[in-house]
C-alpha cells in the first residue's frame, strides 16, 4: 500500500460557493468510489477561494496564491491505494473533472 | 561470426523482451533484471560454445538470468533496497520454485510475460518520449547509445531520461501488469501510439540526411507482430500491423537514386513489396468485418487503397475520401482533416480542397505543421496561382529539417511550373 495525494484544480479563484447543490452532492458521493475501488481515505480538505490566499517567500508576505495561474488548487485528499493504477482509477471519478477542472495525482513520500 | 555468436545475436534480437519480462517477475526491479539478462547473454557465448546451442535458447537464457537475479537478491537481502520493489500483485514465490526444473529440461516453455512489460513501459503516467525509449530498451533490447542516436539526443540525456522513467515506475508504484478489461482499450491505444511513433521516427526521420532508419522500422514491425500474437483478438492491433506493412512496402521507392524524395505519383509501383501489401489487405478485410472499425484499421484501409491502385491516376479517390470521413468520426484530428484535402482535390477539384484547407489554417494544432503549407502550395500550383504557391513552398521549407524534403521543396521553388 502507498499513499497518494489527489489535488483538485479549478478555474481561479475556485470558489466552492459557486457550486450547485448537485455538484456538492457529487463530491460527497465520490467518497464511496474510493472504498469501492480498493482505496481508503487518509485525509481530505476543501479550500476557500484563492482570493483569500496569502503567500510567503524569503522577501516577504504577499496576497494571492503562490503561483499566478488560470487554474488553482481547490482542495485535495490523501488516499491509501495498492498502486498507481488504483489511484488513477479513483481520481478519474472525481467530479471536479466534469466541473470544468481536473485533478493531479501525486505519490506521497515515505 | 561463428554459429554460437550468431545464435546469441539471433536470440538477442528475437527473445530479449521475453527473457527480460520473465526475469523482472523474479528480480522485481527493472535495473537488476536488465543487468541479469545482459549477463545471461554474455554467459551464453561461452556456455553454448562448450555445451552446444540449446534447443530452446529463450528458456536457457531465462533460467540463467532468473538465477542471477535470485543470487543478487539473496546477497543483498541484508541491505534495504534503494527503491520500493515493482508492484506485482500475484504469485512471485511459486515462480522461483518452479524455475529450477527448466534448466534440466531445456524444452521448458518460457511463460510469456511480455504484455506486462509492454504495458508497464507504455504507462500513461510516463512521458511519451520515455515510453518510447523504455520500450526500445526493455522490450526490444536496443542499446541506450543506439536509441539516443535515433532520437538525436546525447547518450547521457537518453540514459537520464530512462533512469527518471524507471524511478517513476518504482516510486509512483506503477503496477507491473496487464491493465484490467475496463482500462484496456485506452491503455492499448497508448501502446499502439508508441509503436506507431517508433515506426514514423524510423520511416521519416524528422531531421538528418537519411530518410529511413530501417532499424526502427524493423523493430516496430516485429513488435507489432509480437503484440498481435499476444493479443490475437484486438482488431486495432491488426490495423496497426497492416498500416505499418503497407507504408513500409513503399520503402525502396520513397527516394530516387540521388536521394531525392519522390512523390507518390512518381514512385515505381513495380518495386513495391506486394507480399506485404497482400498481408496488410487480409488484415484490413478482417479488421473491417464486424463493423465500427477503429482508427488504425481505417488508416490502414486508406493507405492500402493508395497502394493497391495500379497507377496513381487510377486510385479510388472517392472511396478514400469516404474512409477519411469515417476516420474523422473516430479520430477528429485537424491533421486527419488536412490529409483528407489531398484525395478531396482529386474528387472535387483543387479549388474545393483549398477552401477546406483554408478553414484548417486557424487550427492551433496545425500552427507550424510543415505539411499544411506543403499541401497548400501544391493546390495553389495546380490552380495556376504560382506566386502564392512559391510563397507557401517557402513557408514549408522553413519548417522542415529533413534533407530529402528540403531538396524537394527547394526544387519546387526553383521551378514551380513543373508538373
Image (cartoon, rainbow, N blue to C red):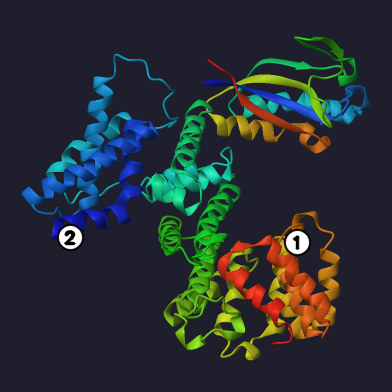
Instruction: Kindly give the residue lying farthest to the left in the view shown.
Output: B50
Say which of B9 and B194 sits in front: B9
* Tag 1 secondary structure: helix
- Residue B26: x and y in percent read 31, 33
- Residue A37: x and y in percent read 61, 30
* B118 lies left or right of B325: left
Q: Quadrant of residue B386?
A: bottom right
Seen at 69% across and 74% down, the residue is: B323
Q: Nearer the viewer, mark 2 or mark 1?
A: 2
What chain does badge 1 belong to? B
Q: CA distance from mark 2 to mark 1?
A: 50 Å
Which residue is the site of mark 2? B1
Marker disc for residue B195: none
Q: Are marks 2 and 1 in contact (CB under 8 Å)?
A: no
Say which of B206 and A5 sits in front: B206
Which residue is the site of mark 1? B334
Is B358 drawn above or below residue B166 in the view shown?
Answer: below
Amino acid at each position: 500500500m502507498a499513499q497518494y495525494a489527489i489535488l483538485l484544480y479549478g478555474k481561479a479563484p475556485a470558489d466552492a460557493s459557486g457550486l450547485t447543490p448537485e455538484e456538492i452532492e457529487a463530491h460527497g458521493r465520490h467518497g464511496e468510489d474510493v472504498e469501492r475501488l480498493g482505496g481508503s481515505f487518509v485525509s481530505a480538505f476543501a479550500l476557500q477561494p484563492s482570493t483569500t490566499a496569502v503567500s510567503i517567500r524569503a522577501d516577504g508576505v504577499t496576497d494571492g496564491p503562490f503561483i499566478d495561474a488560470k487554474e488553482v488548487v481547490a482542495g485535495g485528499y490523501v488516499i491509501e491505494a495498492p498502486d498507481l493504477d488504483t489511484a488513477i482509477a479513483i481520481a478519474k471519478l472525481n467530479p471536479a473533472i466534469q466541473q470544468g477542472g481536473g485533478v493531479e495525482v501525486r505519490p506521497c513520500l515515505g | 561470426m561463428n554459429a554460437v555468436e550468431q545464435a546469441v545475436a539471433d536470440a538477442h534480437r528475437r527473445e530479449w523482451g521475453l527473457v527480460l519480462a520473465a526475469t523482472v517477475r523474479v528480480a522485481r526491479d527493472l535495473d537488476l533484471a536488465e543487468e541479469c539478462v545482459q549477463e545471461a547473454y554474455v554467459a551464453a557465448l561461452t556456455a553454448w560454445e562448450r555445451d552446444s546451442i540449446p534447443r530452446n535458447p529463450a528458456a536457457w537464457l531465462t533460467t540463467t538470468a532468473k538465477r542471477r537475479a535470485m543470487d543478487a537478491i539473496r546477497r543483498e537481502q541484508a541491505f534495504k533496497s534503494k527503491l520500493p520493489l515493482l508492484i506485482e500483485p500475484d504469485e512471485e514465490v511459486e515462480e522461483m520454485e518452479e524455475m529450477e526444473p527448466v534448466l534440466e529440461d531445456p524444452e521448458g516453455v518460457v511463460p510469456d510475460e511480455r504484455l506486462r512489460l509492454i504495458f508497464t513501459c507504455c504507462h500513461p503516467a510516463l512521458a511519451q518520449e520515455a515510453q518510447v525509449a523504455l520500450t526500445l530498451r526493455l522490450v526490444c533490447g536496443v542499446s541506450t547509445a543506439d536509441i539516443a542516436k535515433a532520437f538525436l539526443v546525447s547518450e547521457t540525456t537518453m540514459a537520464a531520461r530512462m533512469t527518471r522513467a524507471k524511478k517513476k515506475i518504482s516510486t509512483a508504484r506503477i503496477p507491473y501488469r496487464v491493465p484490467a478489461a475496463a482500462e484496456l482499450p485506452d491503455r492499448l491505444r497508448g501502446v499502439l501510439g508508441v509503436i506507431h511513433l517508433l515506426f514514423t521516427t524510423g520511416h521519416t526521420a524528422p531531421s538528418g540526411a537519411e530518410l529511413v532508419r530501417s532499424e526502427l522500422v524493423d523493430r516496430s514491425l516485429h513488435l507489432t507482430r509480437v503484440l498481435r500474437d499476444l493479443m490475437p483478438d484486438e482488431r486495432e492491433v491488426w490495423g496497426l500491423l497492416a498500416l505499418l506493412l503497407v507504408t513500409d512496402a513503399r520503402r525502396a521507392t520513397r527516394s530516387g537514386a540521388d536521394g531525392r524524395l519522390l512523390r507518390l505519383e512518381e514512385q515505381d509501383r513495380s518495386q513495391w513489396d506486394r507480399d506485404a501489401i497482400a498481408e496488410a489487405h487480409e488484415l484490413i478485410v478482417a479488421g473491417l468485418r464486424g463493423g465500427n472499425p477503429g482508427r488504425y484499421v481505417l488508416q490502414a484501409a486508406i493507405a492500402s487503397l493508395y497502394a493497391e491502385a495500379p497507377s496513381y491516376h487510377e486510385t479510388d479517390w472517392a472511396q478514400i475520401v469516404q474512409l477519411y470521413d469515417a476516420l474523422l468520426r473516430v479520430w477528429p484530428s485537424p491533421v486527419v482533416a488536412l490529409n483528407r484535402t489531398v484525395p478531396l482535390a482529386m474528387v472535387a477539384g483543387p479549388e474545393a480542397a483549398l477552401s477546406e484547407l483554408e478553414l484548417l489554417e486557424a487550427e492551433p494544432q496545425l500552427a507550424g505543421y510543415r505539411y499544411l503549407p506543403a499541401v497548400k502550395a501544391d493546390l495553389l500550383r495546380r490552380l495556376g496561382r504560382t506566386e502564392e504557391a512559391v510563397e507557401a513552398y517557402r513557408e514549408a521549407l522553413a519548417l522542415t529539417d529533413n534533407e530529402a524534403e528540403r531538396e524537394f521543396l527547394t526544387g519546387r521553388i526553383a521551378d514551380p511550373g513543373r508538373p
